[in-house]
Image (tube, rainbow, N blue to C red):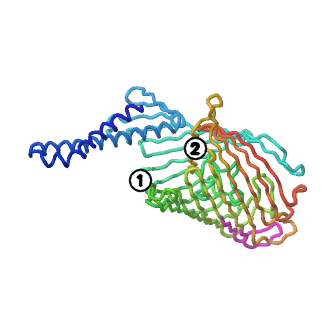
Protein backbone atom coordinates (compact mmCIF):
# COMPACT_ATOMS: atom_id res chain seq x y z
CA UNK A 1 0.00 0.00 0.00
CA UNK A 2 2.80 2.41 0.78
CA UNK A 3 4.44 1.98 -2.59
CA UNK A 4 1.24 2.43 -4.55
CA UNK A 5 0.38 5.50 -2.56
CA UNK A 6 3.80 7.09 -2.97
CA UNK A 7 4.43 6.61 -6.76
CA UNK A 8 1.52 8.73 -8.13
CA UNK A 9 2.39 11.55 -5.76
CA UNK A 10 6.12 11.52 -6.73
CA UNK A 11 5.38 11.38 -10.45
CA UNK A 12 2.97 14.28 -10.25
CA UNK A 13 5.45 16.33 -8.22
CA UNK A 14 8.30 15.73 -10.70
CA UNK A 15 6.14 16.52 -13.72
CA UNK A 16 4.58 19.57 -12.14
CA UNK A 17 7.99 20.86 -10.96
CA UNK A 18 9.50 20.45 -14.40
CA UNK A 19 6.65 22.30 -16.04
CA UNK A 20 6.65 25.14 -13.52
CA UNK A 21 10.43 25.68 -13.42
CA UNK A 22 10.91 25.40 -17.15
CA UNK A 23 7.90 27.44 -18.19
CA UNK A 24 9.44 30.97 -17.99
CA UNK A 25 12.54 30.11 -20.09
CA UNK A 26 10.62 28.02 -22.60
CA UNK A 27 7.95 30.71 -23.05
CA UNK A 28 10.60 33.27 -24.12
CA UNK A 29 12.04 31.19 -26.98
CA UNK A 30 9.40 28.66 -28.02
CA UNK A 31 7.35 29.17 -31.22
CA UNK A 32 3.52 29.46 -30.93
CA UNK A 33 2.95 25.74 -31.59
CA UNK A 34 5.34 24.79 -28.80
CA UNK A 35 3.73 27.34 -26.47
CA UNK A 36 0.37 25.70 -27.15
CA UNK A 37 1.93 22.34 -26.34
CA UNK A 38 3.32 23.82 -23.11
CA UNK A 39 -0.14 24.98 -22.09
CA UNK A 40 -1.49 21.51 -22.79
CA UNK A 41 1.22 19.99 -20.59
CA UNK A 42 0.38 22.43 -17.81
CA UNK A 43 -3.29 21.42 -17.99
CA UNK A 44 -2.31 17.75 -17.90
CA UNK A 45 -0.10 18.41 -14.87
CA UNK A 46 -2.96 20.19 -13.09
CA UNK A 47 -5.30 17.31 -13.91
CA UNK A 48 -2.76 14.73 -12.71
CA UNK A 49 -2.23 16.69 -9.48
CA UNK A 50 -6.00 16.78 -8.87
CA UNK A 51 -6.27 13.03 -9.49
CA UNK A 52 -3.43 12.34 -7.04
CA UNK A 53 -5.14 14.44 -4.37
CA UNK A 54 -8.40 12.55 -4.87
CA UNK A 55 -6.55 9.22 -4.70
CA UNK A 56 -4.85 10.26 -1.47
CA UNK A 57 -8.20 11.31 -0.02
CA UNK A 58 -9.76 7.93 -0.92
CA UNK A 59 -6.80 6.04 0.56
CA UNK A 60 -6.95 8.14 3.75
CA UNK A 61 -10.69 7.47 4.05
CA UNK A 62 -10.09 3.75 3.62
CA UNK A 63 -7.35 3.87 6.28
CA UNK A 64 -9.75 5.64 8.68
CA UNK A 65 -12.39 3.02 8.03
CA UNK A 66 -9.86 0.23 8.62
CA UNK A 67 -8.84 1.87 11.89
CA UNK A 68 -12.40 1.54 13.14
CA UNK A 69 -11.82 -2.14 13.74
CA UNK A 70 -12.35 -5.51 12.13
CA UNK A 71 -14.83 -5.45 9.26
CA UNK A 72 -15.79 -7.85 6.55
CA UNK A 73 -18.33 -8.20 3.78
CA UNK A 74 -19.66 -11.26 2.01
CA UNK A 75 -22.07 -11.08 -0.88
CA UNK A 76 -24.77 -13.64 -1.53
CA UNK A 77 -25.64 -12.99 -5.15
CA UNK A 78 -26.39 -9.47 -6.30
CA UNK A 79 -28.92 -8.59 -3.61
CA UNK A 80 -27.71 -9.67 -0.16
CA UNK A 81 -24.60 -8.55 1.74
CA UNK A 82 -23.63 -9.92 5.16
CA UNK A 83 -21.25 -7.53 6.90
CA UNK A 84 -19.53 -7.06 10.23
CA UNK A 85 -19.23 -3.47 11.40
CA UNK A 86 -19.21 -3.37 15.22
CA UNK A 87 -21.94 -5.99 15.02
CA UNK A 88 -23.55 -8.34 12.53
CA UNK A 89 -25.51 -6.63 9.75
CA UNK A 90 -27.45 -8.00 6.80
CA UNK A 91 -28.23 -5.70 3.86
CA UNK A 92 -30.68 -6.24 1.02
CA UNK A 93 -29.45 -4.14 -1.91
CA UNK A 94 -31.27 -2.45 -4.75
CA UNK A 95 -29.20 -3.47 -7.83
CA UNK A 96 -30.92 -0.85 -9.97
CA UNK A 97 -29.84 2.07 -7.75
CA UNK A 98 -26.79 3.87 -9.25
CA UNK A 99 -25.94 5.81 -6.06
CA UNK A 100 -23.82 3.52 -3.78
CA UNK A 101 -25.01 5.34 -0.63
CA UNK A 102 -28.67 4.64 -1.52
CA UNK A 103 -28.14 1.07 -2.69
CA UNK A 104 -28.94 -0.57 0.71
CA UNK A 105 -32.73 -0.92 0.65
CA UNK A 106 -33.30 -2.91 3.88
CA UNK A 107 -31.00 -3.64 6.83
CA UNK A 108 -31.12 -5.78 9.97
CA UNK A 109 -28.42 -5.52 12.68
CA UNK A 110 -27.92 -7.32 15.98
CA UNK A 111 -26.30 -5.78 19.05
CA UNK A 112 -25.92 -6.48 22.74
CA UNK A 113 -23.99 -5.86 25.92
CA UNK A 114 -23.06 -7.66 29.12
CA UNK A 115 -22.01 -5.74 32.24
CA UNK A 116 -20.78 -7.65 35.30
CA UNK A 117 -20.28 -5.53 38.44
CA UNK A 118 -18.77 -5.99 41.85
CA UNK A 119 -19.77 -3.56 44.61
CA UNK A 120 -17.69 -3.18 47.73
CA UNK A 121 -18.99 -1.07 50.62
CA UNK A 122 -16.01 -0.02 52.71
CA UNK A 123 -18.04 0.94 55.80
CA UNK A 124 -19.01 -2.10 57.87
CA UNK A 125 -22.06 -0.17 59.06
CA UNK A 126 -23.38 0.08 55.50
CA UNK A 127 -26.89 -1.31 54.99
CA UNK A 128 -25.67 -2.92 51.76
CA UNK A 129 -23.75 -6.16 51.25
CA UNK A 130 -20.70 -6.56 49.07
CA UNK A 131 -21.93 -8.39 46.01
CA UNK A 132 -21.51 -9.37 42.39
CA UNK A 133 -24.27 -8.03 40.12
CA UNK A 134 -25.27 -8.68 36.54
CA UNK A 135 -25.99 -5.02 35.87
CA UNK A 136 -27.11 -5.35 32.26
CA UNK A 137 -27.78 -8.24 29.89
CA UNK A 138 -29.03 -6.45 26.81
CA UNK A 139 -29.99 -7.86 23.42
CA UNK A 140 -31.35 -5.80 20.56
CA UNK A 141 -32.17 -5.66 16.89
CA UNK A 142 -32.30 -2.55 14.74
CA UNK A 143 -32.36 -1.59 11.10
CA UNK A 144 -34.47 0.00 8.40
CA UNK A 145 -36.92 -0.79 5.64
CA UNK A 146 -37.01 1.08 2.33
CA UNK A 147 -34.05 3.21 3.50
CA UNK A 148 -36.04 5.63 5.67
CA UNK A 149 -38.27 3.54 7.92
CA UNK A 150 -35.99 2.81 10.90
CA UNK A 151 -36.77 0.65 13.92
CA UNK A 152 -35.23 -0.63 17.12
CA UNK A 153 -36.23 -3.34 19.61
CA UNK A 154 -34.21 -4.19 22.74
CA UNK A 155 -34.77 -5.94 26.05
CA UNK A 156 -32.80 -6.47 29.24
CA UNK A 157 -32.65 -9.75 31.18
CA UNK A 158 -30.68 -8.64 34.24
CA UNK A 159 -33.51 -7.78 36.66
CA UNK A 160 -33.99 -10.91 38.78
CA UNK A 161 -34.44 -12.99 35.68
CA UNK A 162 -37.38 -10.90 34.42
CA UNK A 163 -37.33 -9.51 30.91
CA UNK A 164 -37.61 -5.73 30.81
CA UNK A 165 -38.52 -3.98 27.57
CA UNK A 166 -36.16 -1.11 26.77
CA UNK A 167 -36.47 0.32 23.26
CA UNK A 168 -39.42 -0.33 20.97
CA UNK A 169 -39.92 2.35 18.35
CA UNK A 170 -40.32 3.15 14.69
CA UNK A 171 -38.75 6.26 13.14
CA UNK A 172 -39.41 8.02 9.85
CA UNK A 173 -36.07 9.45 8.66
CA UNK A 174 -36.89 10.98 5.27
CA UNK A 175 -35.84 14.49 6.32
CA UNK A 176 -32.70 15.16 8.33
CA UNK A 177 -34.25 18.31 9.78
CA UNK A 178 -37.54 16.68 10.85
CA UNK A 179 -37.67 13.00 11.81
CA UNK A 180 -40.61 11.36 13.54
CA UNK A 181 -40.28 8.67 16.23
CA UNK A 182 -43.17 6.70 17.79
CA UNK A 183 -43.03 4.08 20.55
CA UNK A 184 -40.90 3.63 23.66
CA UNK A 185 -37.59 5.50 23.79
CA UNK A 186 -35.51 7.65 26.12
CA UNK A 187 -37.09 10.83 27.44
CA UNK A 188 -35.14 13.65 25.70
CA UNK A 189 -33.60 15.15 28.84
CA UNK A 190 -30.15 15.00 30.45
CA UNK A 191 -27.10 14.44 28.29
CA UNK A 192 -25.68 11.54 30.33
CA UNK A 193 -29.06 9.78 30.43
CA UNK A 194 -29.40 9.98 26.65
CA UNK A 195 -26.01 8.36 26.07
CA UNK A 196 -25.97 4.60 25.69
CA UNK A 197 -25.11 2.72 28.88
CA UNK A 198 -22.22 1.25 26.85
CA UNK A 199 -20.54 4.65 26.81
CA UNK A 200 -21.23 6.23 30.20
CA UNK A 201 -18.42 8.28 31.73
CA UNK A 202 -18.75 6.43 35.05
CA UNK A 203 -20.33 3.18 36.14
CA UNK A 204 -23.56 4.71 37.47
CA UNK A 205 -25.67 7.64 36.28
CA UNK A 206 -25.77 10.93 38.23
CA UNK A 207 -28.02 11.02 41.30
CA UNK A 208 -30.33 13.69 39.90
CA UNK A 209 -31.42 11.38 37.08
CA UNK A 210 -32.72 8.92 39.69
CA UNK A 211 -34.35 11.62 41.82
CA UNK A 212 -36.21 13.16 38.86
CA UNK A 213 -37.19 9.72 37.47
CA UNK A 214 -35.96 10.42 33.92
CA UNK A 215 -35.99 7.23 31.88
CA UNK A 216 -37.60 5.60 28.87
CA UNK A 217 -41.27 6.34 28.24
CA UNK A 218 -44.04 5.82 25.71
CA UNK A 219 -44.83 8.65 23.33
CA UNK A 220 -44.12 10.45 20.09
CA UNK A 221 -41.19 12.69 19.19
CA UNK A 222 -40.07 14.91 16.36
CA UNK A 223 -36.38 15.75 16.15
CA UNK A 224 -33.88 17.00 13.65
CA UNK A 225 -30.40 18.25 12.80
CA UNK A 226 -29.99 21.88 11.78
CA UNK A 227 -26.82 23.64 10.66
CA UNK A 228 -25.73 24.74 14.13
CA UNK A 229 -28.16 22.89 16.40
CA UNK A 230 -30.35 19.90 16.95
CA UNK A 231 -33.72 19.73 18.68
CA UNK A 232 -36.22 17.26 20.16
CA UNK A 233 -39.92 17.81 20.87
CA UNK A 234 -41.89 15.01 22.54
CA UNK A 235 -45.28 14.17 24.01
CA UNK A 236 -45.06 11.23 26.44
CA UNK A 237 -47.13 9.38 29.04
CA UNK A 238 -44.86 10.30 31.92
CA UNK A 239 -45.17 6.83 33.46
CA UNK A 240 -41.65 5.46 32.76
CA UNK A 241 -41.49 2.24 30.81
CA UNK A 242 -44.06 0.12 29.08
CA UNK A 243 -47.09 1.24 31.10
CA UNK A 244 -50.38 2.86 30.15
CA UNK A 245 -50.96 6.39 31.41
CA UNK A 246 -52.73 6.84 34.74
CA UNK A 247 -54.48 10.08 33.71
CA UNK A 248 -55.44 12.10 30.64
CA UNK A 249 -52.54 14.54 30.97
CA UNK A 250 -49.28 14.05 29.07
CA UNK A 251 -45.73 15.25 29.63
CA UNK A 252 -44.54 17.86 27.13
CA UNK A 253 -40.76 17.86 26.62
CA UNK A 254 -38.48 20.12 24.58
CA UNK A 255 -34.70 20.01 24.17
CA UNK A 256 -32.40 22.26 22.13
CA UNK A 257 -28.62 21.89 21.78
CA UNK A 258 -26.41 24.44 20.01
CA UNK A 259 -23.18 23.44 18.24
CA UNK A 260 -21.88 26.85 17.14
CA UNK A 261 -18.48 25.87 15.73
CA UNK A 262 -18.05 24.15 12.38
CA UNK A 263 -15.55 21.26 12.12
CA UNK A 264 -12.14 22.29 10.86
CA UNK A 265 -12.44 26.03 11.53
CA UNK A 266 -11.85 26.13 15.30
CA UNK A 267 -10.47 22.68 16.19
CA UNK A 268 -10.44 23.09 19.97
CA UNK A 269 -14.10 24.25 20.01
CA UNK A 270 -15.67 22.17 17.25
CA UNK A 271 -16.71 19.62 19.90
CA UNK A 272 -18.58 22.24 21.98
CA UNK A 273 -22.30 21.77 22.62
CA UNK A 274 -24.49 23.91 24.90
CA UNK A 275 -28.14 23.15 25.45
CA UNK A 276 -31.16 22.97 27.67
CA UNK A 277 -34.35 20.98 28.13
CA UNK A 278 -37.68 21.38 29.88
CA UNK A 279 -40.67 19.14 30.59
CA UNK A 280 -44.06 19.79 32.14
CA UNK A 281 -46.92 17.51 33.07
CA UNK A 282 -49.58 16.84 35.66
CA UNK A 283 -49.53 13.66 37.72
CA UNK A 284 -51.17 12.45 40.89
CA UNK A 285 -48.74 9.62 41.63
CA UNK A 286 -45.26 11.04 41.08
CA UNK A 287 -42.73 10.41 43.83
CA UNK A 288 -39.06 11.50 43.69
CA UNK A 289 -36.61 8.73 44.53
CA UNK A 290 -34.02 10.12 46.96
CA UNK A 291 -31.33 7.50 46.50
CA UNK A 292 -27.58 7.76 46.00
CA UNK A 293 -25.58 5.75 43.45
CA UNK A 294 -24.78 3.29 46.26
CA UNK A 295 -28.48 2.56 46.70
CA UNK A 296 -28.78 4.36 50.06
CA UNK A 297 -32.02 6.27 50.62
CA UNK A 298 -30.99 9.67 51.99
CA UNK A 299 -34.47 11.23 52.40
CA UNK A 300 -37.82 9.68 53.30
CA UNK A 301 -40.81 12.03 53.04
CA UNK A 302 -43.15 9.60 54.77
CA UNK A 303 -45.93 9.31 52.20
CA UNK A 304 -48.90 7.34 53.46
CA UNK A 305 -51.16 7.24 50.39
CA UNK A 306 -50.91 6.97 46.62
CA UNK A 307 -51.99 10.58 46.05
CA UNK A 308 -48.76 12.48 46.37
CA UNK A 309 -49.28 15.29 43.91
CA UNK A 310 -52.18 17.52 42.92
CA UNK A 311 -50.35 20.06 40.73
CA UNK A 312 -47.80 20.21 37.95
CA UNK A 313 -44.45 18.52 37.57
CA UNK A 314 -41.73 20.73 36.11
CA UNK A 315 -38.22 19.61 35.16
CA UNK A 316 -35.78 22.06 33.57
CA UNK A 317 -32.05 21.91 33.06
CA UNK A 318 -28.99 22.93 31.12
CA UNK A 319 -26.08 20.98 29.69
CA UNK A 320 -22.51 21.64 28.59
CA UNK A 321 -20.19 19.40 26.60
CA UNK A 322 -16.70 20.00 25.25
CA UNK A 323 -14.93 17.15 23.45
CA UNK A 324 -11.37 17.96 22.37
CA UNK A 325 -9.50 14.82 21.35
CA UNK A 326 -8.60 12.88 24.53
CA UNK A 327 -10.23 15.48 26.83
CA UNK A 328 -13.90 15.72 27.73
CA UNK A 329 -15.58 18.29 29.97
CA UNK A 330 -19.23 17.63 30.70
CA UNK A 331 -21.67 19.27 33.11
CA UNK A 332 -25.43 19.36 33.72
CA UNK A 333 -27.86 21.15 36.02
CA UNK A 334 -31.45 20.08 36.69
CA UNK A 335 -34.28 21.68 38.66
CA UNK A 336 -37.28 19.57 39.68
CA UNK A 337 -40.43 21.21 41.05
CA UNK A 338 -43.30 19.08 42.33
CA UNK A 339 -46.25 21.43 42.85
CA UNK A 340 -48.83 20.78 45.61
CA UNK A 341 -46.84 17.90 47.01
CA UNK A 342 -48.64 16.01 49.81
CA UNK A 343 -46.67 14.52 52.71
CA UNK A 344 -47.65 11.62 54.90
CA UNK A 345 -48.95 14.10 57.49
CA UNK A 346 -51.33 15.60 54.95
CA UNK A 347 -49.47 18.90 54.57
CA UNK A 348 -49.33 20.31 51.08
CA UNK A 349 -46.83 22.60 49.34
CA UNK A 350 -44.25 22.84 46.57
CA UNK A 351 -41.19 20.61 46.66
CA UNK A 352 -38.06 21.85 44.86
CA UNK A 353 -34.98 19.75 44.17
CA UNK A 354 -31.85 21.05 42.46
CA UNK A 355 -28.82 19.08 41.42
CA UNK A 356 -26.21 18.36 38.83
CA UNK A 357 -22.71 17.14 38.16
CA UNK A 358 -19.38 18.11 36.61
CA UNK A 359 -17.21 15.53 34.79
CA UNK A 360 -13.58 15.84 33.73
CA UNK A 361 -12.10 12.92 31.78
CA UNK A 362 -8.82 12.40 29.95
CA UNK A 363 -7.42 9.59 27.81
CA UNK A 364 -3.92 8.93 29.13
CA UNK A 365 -2.97 7.06 25.96
CA UNK A 366 -4.07 9.89 23.68
CA UNK A 367 -7.08 8.41 21.86
CA UNK A 368 -10.13 10.50 21.03
CA UNK A 369 -13.00 10.28 23.53
CA UNK A 370 -16.19 10.93 21.53
CA UNK A 371 -19.67 11.35 22.98
CA UNK A 372 -21.92 8.28 22.79
CA UNK A 373 -19.47 6.30 20.66
CA UNK A 374 -16.92 3.66 21.49
CA UNK A 375 -13.28 4.33 22.19
CA UNK A 376 -10.92 2.70 19.68
CA UNK A 377 -7.51 1.97 21.29
CA UNK A 378 -4.43 2.76 19.26
CA UNK A 379 -3.17 -0.69 20.27
CA UNK A 380 -5.40 -3.51 21.51
CA UNK A 381 -4.52 -5.41 24.65
CA UNK A 382 -2.09 -8.14 23.67
CA UNK A 383 0.83 -8.49 26.12
CA UNK A 384 2.62 -10.91 23.80
CA UNK A 385 2.74 -8.21 21.13
CA UNK A 386 3.33 -5.33 23.53
CA UNK A 387 -0.17 -3.88 23.32
CA UNK A 388 -1.89 -2.61 26.48
CA UNK A 389 -5.09 -1.02 25.23
CA UNK A 390 -6.29 2.49 26.10
CA UNK A 391 -6.37 4.06 29.57
CA UNK A 392 -8.50 6.87 30.92
CA UNK A 393 -8.90 8.74 34.21
CA UNK A 394 -11.87 10.81 35.33
CA UNK A 395 -13.41 12.79 38.16
CA UNK A 396 -17.07 13.60 38.89
CA UNK A 397 -18.68 15.92 41.43
CA UNK A 398 -22.35 15.03 41.83
CA UNK A 399 -24.81 16.92 44.08
CA UNK A 400 -28.49 16.91 45.07
CA UNK A 401 -30.05 19.68 47.19
CA UNK A 402 -33.67 19.47 48.40
CA UNK A 403 -35.60 22.67 49.13
CA UNK A 404 -39.15 23.37 50.19
CA UNK A 405 -39.34 20.24 52.31
CA UNK A 406 -42.51 20.09 54.37
CA UNK A 407 -42.31 19.52 58.13
CA UNK A 408 -43.55 16.17 59.35
CA UNK A 409 -42.68 13.73 62.09
CA UNK A 410 -42.44 10.99 59.48
CA UNK A 411 -39.70 12.72 57.47
CA UNK A 412 -36.15 11.57 58.10
CA UNK A 413 -32.89 12.03 56.27
CA UNK A 414 -30.83 14.87 54.86
CA UNK A 415 -31.51 17.76 52.49
CA UNK A 416 -28.18 17.60 50.65
CA UNK A 417 -25.83 14.94 49.35
CA UNK A 418 -22.50 15.38 47.56
CA UNK A 419 -20.73 12.52 45.82
CA UNK A 420 -17.10 12.62 44.65
CA UNK A 421 -16.08 9.88 42.21
CA UNK A 422 -12.63 8.99 40.89
CA UNK A 423 -12.65 6.67 37.91
CA UNK A 424 -10.19 4.55 35.95
CA UNK A 425 -11.28 3.02 32.64
CA UNK A 426 -9.28 0.46 30.70
CA UNK A 427 -10.32 -0.27 27.10
CA UNK A 428 -8.76 -3.60 26.21
CA UNK A 429 -10.09 -3.26 22.68
CA UNK A 430 -13.12 -1.74 21.01
CA UNK A 431 -15.42 -4.40 22.50
CA UNK A 432 -14.18 -4.96 26.08
CA UNK A 433 -13.82 -2.42 28.89
CA UNK A 434 -12.84 -2.66 32.57
CA UNK A 435 -13.90 0.14 34.95
CA UNK A 436 -13.08 0.97 38.56
CA UNK A 437 -14.83 3.79 40.47
CA UNK A 438 -14.20 4.97 44.01
CA UNK A 439 -16.97 7.20 45.38
CA UNK A 440 -17.15 9.12 48.65
CA UNK A 441 -20.72 10.17 49.44
CA UNK A 442 -21.02 13.05 51.90
CA UNK A 443 -24.34 13.54 53.74
CA UNK A 444 -25.12 16.92 55.25
CA UNK A 445 -27.14 15.32 58.07
CA UNK A 446 -27.74 11.87 59.51
CA UNK A 447 -29.66 9.80 56.97
CA UNK A 448 -31.25 7.61 59.64
CA UNK A 449 -30.03 4.54 57.74
CA UNK A 450 -27.92 2.12 59.83
CA UNK A 451 -25.05 4.05 61.43
CA UNK A 452 -24.19 6.14 58.36
CA UNK A 453 -24.12 9.74 59.52
CA UNK A 454 -21.69 11.86 57.52
CA UNK A 455 -20.16 9.88 54.67
CA UNK A 456 -20.12 6.57 52.81
CA UNK A 457 -17.28 5.00 50.80
CA UNK A 458 -18.09 2.71 47.88
CA UNK A 459 -15.96 1.00 45.25
CA UNK A 460 -17.45 -0.28 42.00
CA UNK A 461 -15.83 -2.58 39.45
CA UNK A 462 -17.23 -3.47 36.06
CA UNK A 463 -16.30 -5.80 33.23
CA UNK A 464 -18.25 -4.75 30.14
CA UNK A 465 -18.60 -6.53 26.81
CA UNK A 466 -20.44 -4.97 23.89
CA UNK A 467 -20.91 -5.56 20.18
Numbered mark located on residue 213 in the image = none
Please tell me which residue lies in front, 161 or 12.
12
Residue 78 in the image: state x and y as whole percent: 37, 29
**Where does the image place residue 346, in percent across and percent down from the top left?**
81, 70
Report the front residue among 125 and 56: 56
In the figure, 346 relative to 77: above or below? Answer: below
Residue 46 image point, x, y percent: 25, 45
**Label 1 Cα neighbours within 10 Å, binned few <14 / some 14-19 / many ≥20:** few
Indicate whether 460 appears above or below 289.
above
Regarding mark 1 in the picture, which secondary structure is present there?
A: strand
Residue in the image at 58% along x and 40% along y: 377
Which label lies toward us, 1 or 2? 2
Instruction: Check the image and report above or below for 361 versus 408.
Output: above
Magenta range: 334-352
Considering depth in this image, is 212 or 182 the residue closer to the camera?
212
Task: Quickly name the residue at label 2.
Answer: 374
Amino acid sequence: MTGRRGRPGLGAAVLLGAVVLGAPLWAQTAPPAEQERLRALEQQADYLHEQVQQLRARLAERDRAAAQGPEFERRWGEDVVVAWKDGLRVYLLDPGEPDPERRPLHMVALDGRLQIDYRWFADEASPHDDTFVLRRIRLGVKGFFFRHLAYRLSADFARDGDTQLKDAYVAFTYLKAAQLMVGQFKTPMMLEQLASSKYLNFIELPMMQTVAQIDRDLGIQIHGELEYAHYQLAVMNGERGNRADSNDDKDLIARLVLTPFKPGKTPILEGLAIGGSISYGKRDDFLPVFRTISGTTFLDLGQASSDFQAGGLLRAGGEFLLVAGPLRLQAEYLHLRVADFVTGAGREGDLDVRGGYVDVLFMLTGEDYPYDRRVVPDSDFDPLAGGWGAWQVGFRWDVVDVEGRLASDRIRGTDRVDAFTFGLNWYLNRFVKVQANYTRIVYEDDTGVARIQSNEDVVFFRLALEY
